[in-house]
Amino acid sequence: MRKTKEEQDSLAEPWNRVPRERGRRRWASGRTAQMPDGCYVDDKVSKVAWLNRSNIIFAGEDKWSLDPRVELVTQGQLEYSLRIQKVDVFDEGPYTCSIQTKQQSKTSQVYLIVQVPPIIYKVSEDITVNEGSNVTLTCLANGRPDPSITWRLLNPSAEALDVGEYLEISGIVRSQAGRYECKASNDVSTPDVKYVNVVVNYPPYIKEVRSSETPVGQAGVLHCEASAVPQPEFEWYRDERRLSSSQSVNIQISGSRTLLVVANVTEDDYGNYTCVATNRLGIHNASVFLYKPGTGRDINASGCACQSFWLLLLSVLSALLKC
């Protein structure tokens, strides 16, 4: 059964075509291409054929091609069109309609260009690096026409970074850690997108401490919070003596925060305490105070480095033990 013009148009899926040059037709791979250009017959025509280069596809209504995707489309006595289903890059090339009458012969040629959606075939794996390292992320894609590669760091602002297959980051810093997006686009279809997660290790930095103004007989709570990757380990010291949980003192650690809880404060408990945060990249410490009401100390402070000889020694010993 012959299809109506509307049915033929729906098969062709016009949205799949892009603005075309004269004599050239562009189709996305996997779609149905139809080539009607200038190939119309009437009762004066004695012979008509479709050829791909020098290979005959149809001679009249006789099919010479063995390709089941190729078919002839005729509409009444006029249209003599060639349709190729699920086109691929091997179908690209010139197609010629040859018409012969008793007086003359003429040809009409269409050049089929097959476009391929972008596909990312290689992308960097998720990586973990130390702060200050040089990093190269790779994103390779193919398609027709060649796709454009763009990069974004999705957090926090998803700003555009660079264009190209390789993203170079010199001396990476902690703020450049996160999820990187690689997008390949060529306007044939929706872009192909892949992601790379980048973790940046850096040494601890105590960013907040909170001292405690506590009367005798009540519980005093000292707060300490650090930023680090990998997650820091915490220790508490009173003067130069390391503290551990006991009946009088409880040390609580939750992620990047730690609390030192003095259960029943006595006069001897008042004074300077040191919060120490460590990971395999370094060490940082800050002073926190438990003091008697009315002494007028500022109980909120950012982390202040209070390095002393014993802490430097602790740092060296810690590094040696982890080697």
Image: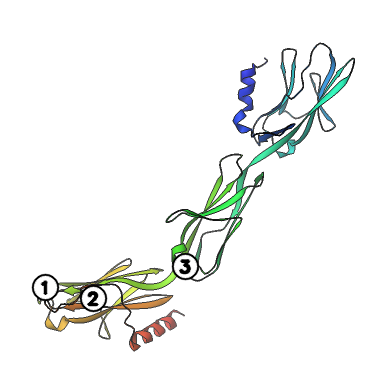
Could you tell me the amino acid type at mark 2? Answer: Ser
Could you tell me the amino acid type at mark 1? Answer: Gln
Q: Residue 173's mark?
A: 3
Residue 162 % position (x, y): 56, 56
**Between disc 2 and disc 1, whose residue precedes?**
1
**In the image, is residue 183 above or below residue 303?**
above
Outermost residue on the top side: it is: 43
- Looking at the image, do the residues carrying marks 3 and 1 touch, with CB atoms under 8 Å apart? no
Residue drawn at x 83%, y 25% is: 107
**In the image, is residue 56 above or below residue 216?**
above
Question: Which is more toward the observer, 219 or 25?
Answer: 25
Position of residue 155 in the picture relative to residue 37 (left or right): left
Residue 29 % position (x, y): 66, 37
**Residue tagged by mark 2?**
245
Question: Which is more toward the observer, 278 or 183?
Answer: 183
- Looking at the image, do the residues carrying marks 2 and 1 touch, with CB atoms under 8 Å apart? no
- Tell me which corner region of the image, top left, top right, bottom left or bottom right, holds residue 90: top right
Classify mark 1: helix, strand or loop: loop
Distance between the alpha carbons at the discs numbered 2 and 1: 18 Å
- Tell me which corner region of the image, top left, top right, bottom left or bottom right, holds residue 32: top right
**Residue tagged by mark 1?**
218
